Image: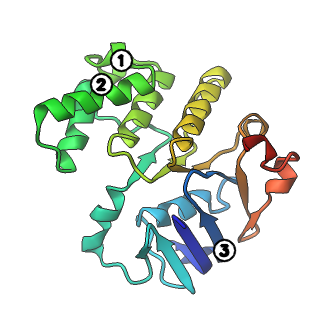
Amino acid sequence: MFIEYKNVNIYQGGKRVLGNVDFHVDEGEFVYIIGHVGSGKSSLLKTLYCELDIDEGDKAVVLERNLLKMKRKEVPALRKELGIIFQDFQLLHDRSVYANLRFVLRATGWKNRKDIDERIDEVLDAVGMSGKKESMPYELSGGEQQRVAIARSILNKPKIIIADEPTGNLDPETADNIVSLLKQVSLTGAAVVMSTHNIPMLDRYQGIVYQCKDGGLNDVTNQYNRLGLAGEE
């Protein structure tokens, strides 16, 4: 089990936003988190990479690490095994696509220039951005910037990709392409956990669906995926 929460309470600014959360994600699963603005989606995702601490719960484990007892000095090691995609891309605008990706690899311990270059070429090819290696972020469209953000997230072959509204600022066609790309990544064995308001996407790319509502988190897969997961098998 990659993620296992049992009876977890999540607080934001001293206020409980989600209570008694049971949440489970395993290898290769594609998981949607839906819900209205302010329902707790982002707060839940932030606990996965320890941007928000969990102080109450029976069990809160991510990649075999107990978040209830984790020390801050242990967080970087966990984050190295995660890929995080933000809605606003968070690219470094003063350097090229290549330099953005090289910065991440060097920061996570890569030293050999040849290995770095080969890995950057691999991920850019995977997201269809091979021809944009020397481009600056401001020269790219929103969809292209998001593709670079996805490339960045898979650089270290993470076990879990966490995507917070990754299609929120994109046109429908580009959004569809981005979710298709994330779906392909999940087929390699990585788990993808994605918050979204794009409900029609749940029919096109089926997965497990959790809903944040009224201070709780519920598995509503059967409501939004009437074929169950049969189409995935």
Give the amino acid at mark 1. Ser
Q: Position of residue 216 (x, y in %)?
A: 72, 71
Quarter in which the C terminus is drawn? top right
Label 1 and label 3: CA atoms lie apart by 40 Å
Indicate which disc, 1 or 2, sits on the residue closer to the N terminus: 2
In the image, is residue 166 above or below residue 50? above
SS for dot 3: strand
Residue 121 got which mark? 2
Q: Residue at x 40, y 19 (%)?
A: 129
Decide if residue 36 is on the left or right side of residue 168: right
Residue 82 in sight: yes
Give the amino acid at mark 3. Asp
**Residue of label 1:** 130
Residue 196 placement: quadrant: top right
State yes or no: discs 1 and 3 in contact (Cβ < 8 Å): no
SS for dot 2: helix
SS for dot 1: helix
Q: Position of residue 131 (x, y in %)?
A: 35, 12
Mark 2: few, some, or many residues within 10 Å (few <14, many ≥20)?
some
In the image, is residue 209 above or below residue 78? above
